[in-house]
Image (spheres, rainbow, N blue to C red):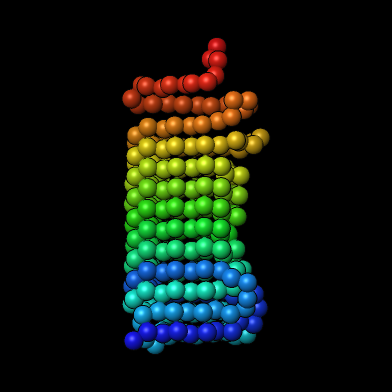
Amino acid sequence: MSSHVHIETTGDAPVIYIESIGGNLRIKGRENAQIVLRSDYDGVPITTNEDGEDIVRLSAFSGDCRLETPENASIKVGAIGGDTDIKALAGEITLERVGGNLRLRKVGSVHVKSVGGDLKAKKVDGDFFVEKTGGNAVALDVEGSLEIGKAGGDIVIAYAAGDVAATAGGNAKVRSAPAAGQVYRVDAGGDISCYLPANVSAAVKVSSRARTIKVRGWDIP
């Protein structure tokens, strides 16, 4: 059995709470005021419009879940057992735990406590915070501050508008055109590669326990 549910919202920016999902989660924003839920779990428990607020709650259920929501919706999820894919969603995204991989594209601000697998985020229109991920982490085009507390594998960061702080268990690769006052702090258990414009004006502090540091493309006095 499966569920296919349509929920009319009272506005274009509802808040959607999901207690937990045993399988995979897919969310896509779109230009209307309707939420469409598809799941292979029959009888998903749903509560809507609490105390006059535009709030939708989904209780815990097993199986996969696919959601189409208004593009300005905010999402708050307790736990996802499998992979998570979210795209075209301008509201705030809060995820407590993702058991598998996490992929984000064209989203608003993001706060994630833990990801069991790999993380890839592209075009984030706000701050981006991830406490830890068990695999690799890729973050491209972030329009706010960026923080990756700890990635078990490699990290790739390309272009963030705010400050950056990241720690990788493996290698780290950073590409940036830093603005005045912007600060990058990157630690890695392996190699660190940093790519900056040739005409950049920046103070760079580098240390290596392996005692091997290479600088290319600049004249070092």
The number of discs equals 0
Front residue of 149/153: it is: 153
Residue 27: percent from left, percent from top: 48, 69
Asked whether 208 or 28 is in front, the reply is 28
Residue found at x 44% / y 74%:
66
Q: Horizontal and vertical percent for residue 7? A: 55, 84
As drawn, 23 above or below 220: below
Place of residue 110 in the rendered image (x, y in percent of width and height, measured from the top left): 52, 58
Residue at position x 51%, y 79% from top?
Answer: 36
- Up the image or down, 14 lies above or below 183; here it is below
Q: Can I make out residue 18 in this image?
A: yes
Is there any visible trace of residue 53 in the rendered image? no
> In the visual, does 56 lie left or right of 25?
right
| Residue at image point 34% right, 39% down | 170
Give above or below for 86 relative to 11.
Answer: above
Quadrant position of residue 193: top left
